[in-house]
Amino acid sequence: MTEPAAQPLHLYNTLSRRKERFEPINAPYVGMYVCGPTVYNYVHLGNVRTFLTFDTLFRYLTFIGYKVRYVRNLTDVGHLVGDGDEGEDKIGRMAKLEKVEPMEIVQRFTNDFHTVTAQFNMRPPSIEPTATGHMLEQIEAVQELLAKGLAYESNGSVYFDIDEYNKRGGEYGKLSGRILDDLLNETRALDGQSEKRSPLDFAVWKRAAPEHIMRWNSPWGEGFPGWHLECSCMSTKYLGKQFDIHGGGMDLKFPHHECEIAQDRGLNDREPVRYWMHSNMLTVNGQKMSKSLGNSFLPAELFAGSHALLDQPYSPMTVRFFMLQSHYRSTLDFSNDALKAAQKGYRRLANGLRIAKLLTYQADDSVTPDLAKQEDIQKAVKQFYDALNDDLNTAVGIAQLFTLLKYINMLYMGQLQVATLGEETFTLLRDSYLSFIHDVLGLYEETTTNQPVLNGLLTLYKEYKEQKQYDKVDQIRSYFKAQGLAIKDMKHQIDWAYEE
RNA sequence: GGUUCCGUGGCCGAGUGGCUAGGCAGAGCUCUGCAAAAGCUCGUACAGCGGUUCGAAUCCGCUCGGAACCUCCA
């Protein structure tokens, strides 16, 4: 752990389209808001990537000494099927289909979401607010927008007035690079659009049609809040009128985040977010993974290997490692070959974790220090920080870990004497390796083993070997192999490892 | 159609005006009863065509190919 000031973190800001030095409004405190899932269905692997990105950012910020308040919402109302302001509520539709209460849908998929995030070793956010839990705040926000003349009521619904917003200096479209005229020209004619003054206007409150089951009383009759409103209300409530980081998937840039900014500025008269961050999509055969394309799969299917696109099961840590090997702003293409390669890489790293914990320093005056190796290690540690500071470049960071791993393996195998590194560099090597992987990247050793049993077998192995009873030796080896473990037969000792 | 982005070696994937990314796979070596593990060594790359430059995979232009957003989507 280092002081935040010692790590010049730079983040790519969607707003400015460049990397900027990260300077929190109130260091060492950092406020970070991430758009969470709409809990109407199981989260798929593409969704996971976004949350993993911001989990890693959360971890790194914390690691370098910031005190982070991480807010990630759950959308449990207001998100409609189909075109923006028309169509059924996603949760309401599921509830109808399954003939259950909407809150049952919400609960089921909230549980699923929590299970999945835990499986991927994501840290829980500091606050996980829900849209239905903030109905009063949302109604008040609508009232305020109306009072300010930035919204208008129409047939029981309330719409945000983009024209008026822009007249007052709003810059609708600046986050996503949209040009208003283009948007206007290309907007399709929608049913019910006549309620709006401009096709670009979006609902902050919707009147509930008779068949709509999720509905709340409001000054405008029974209805429900617009999708974009919850994020504005909850981010302001928990992080203030201006906060440091707002994240989400790239596909939320427009219109969701654009609308959020408009509402925030309308309500609070200031730029709400300092750094907007967007993670890129997970693709399958070059195409975005999404439910509608039918190329998405669920974490559970991945862990079980039970999907037509999957050759075999892949563990959560394999997948986490796989995703961290690419940069969050690049698309990442899913394939079995890539996952298999990641599995091996992850297991090497995991073996290193196990080994690193066993290593201790022993001074030896007869050993000459190897300054080149010491420098190499120090450089790798520094470059890990440099990589993460450079817009969270976990791919380059991981490359450094393999350099550190090499030295850890050499020490363990007796190919390098620990005294050549000196105590300081040795400690740096071991502690950095462990903390980078555990704390920053959120990877841990996945396999659970029964250590005493393994040790007993290894003792037998050694005895049989000394007696040259190679058939028994091979038998023990094959037993280990069947458990996904390998016996490491080294000169000075015998141990086991996760087989790669 | 508009906006934006991408095209890197057998595969995945960083980088980006001159300095080894890395992982996986492949070849060889050390070690070994044989292996495995580990370490060492090795290999071919920057879609195509022009241009700028002492020098470009990296900048500019064009061509080809692909993607995302513009509509719910992480």
Image: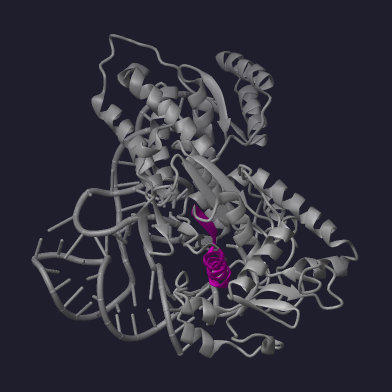
The spot of residue A263 in percent (x, y) is 57, 68
Q: Is residue A471 above or below residue A62?
A: above
From this viewpoint, is residue A13 visible? yes
- Which is nearer the eye, A473 or A308? A308
- Which is nearer the eye, A477 or A309? A309
Q: Residue at x 56, y 14 (%)?
A: A466
Q: Residue at x 57, y 82 (%)?
A: A200
- The reply, left or right, for residue A52 in relation to residue A74 is left
Magenta part of the protein: which range?
Answer: A244-267
- Which is nearer the eye, A249 or A88? A88
Q: Look at the image and tell me in which quarter the C terminus of chain A lies.
A: top right
Helix, strand or loop for the magenta stretch, by majority: helix
Q: Look at the image and tell me in which quarter the N terminus of chain A lies.
A: top left
Image quadrant assignment for residue A262? bottom right
- The verdict on residue A249 being magenta is yes
From this viewpoint, is residue A413 visible? no
